[in-house]
Image (spheres, rainbow, N blue to C red):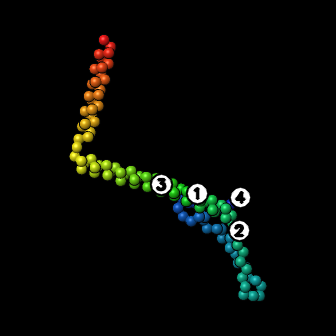
Amino acid sequence: MASNSHRAAPFYGVAAPFRSRDGLSTRAVSGTDEIQLRIDPFDLEDEITGLHTQVRRLKHQMGIMKAQVGVKNNMRRLNKAVIKSGSNHILHIVTFGLVLFLIVYLWSKISRK
């Protein structure tokens, strides 16, 4: 790829900044109303690479945003389900853990003797 003298474009915005003023120039042809137009060539591959990089960044951000929305919606549904059921699941889990701890503790005390 040919080196491009233009700076990279900002993350949001056009693919490349405006070209230099010397990019387009007109010269009057002597004695006629015709105009000659000279356009400086630019490297399309660099422009395409810059656009590709910006699209990849946007896709990555959109993926993260969709994941965050999905987690938020699932947490909302889970909270509604727990409130709707009205049962004491957490109390049952804590009680089970305490009973299990007590059984393991007593079993370890009895097995040492």
| Tag of residue 63 | 3
Picture layout, residue 101 above or below residue 54:
above
For mark 1, give the secondary structure: helix
| Tag of residue 53 | 1
Of marks 4 and 2, which one's residue comes earlier in the chain? 4
Question: Do the CB atoms of the residues marked 4 and 2 lie less than 8 Å apart?
Answer: no
Image quadrant of residue 29? Answer: bottom right
Pick whichever, 66 or 15, lies toward us. Answer: 66
| Tag of residue 1 | 4
Between tags 4 and 2, which lies in front?
4
Residue in view at x 35 percent, y 53 percent? 73
Between tags 3 and 4, which lies in front?
3
Query: Tag 3: Cα neighbours inside 10 Å, few (<14), some, or many (≥20)?
Result: few
Residue sticking out furthest to the top: 113
Query: Tag 1: Cα neighbours inside 10 Å, few (<14), some, or many (≥20)?
Result: few
Image quadrant of residue 1? Answer: bottom right
| Tag of residue 41 | 2
Query: Is 99 situated left or right of 7 in this image?
Result: left
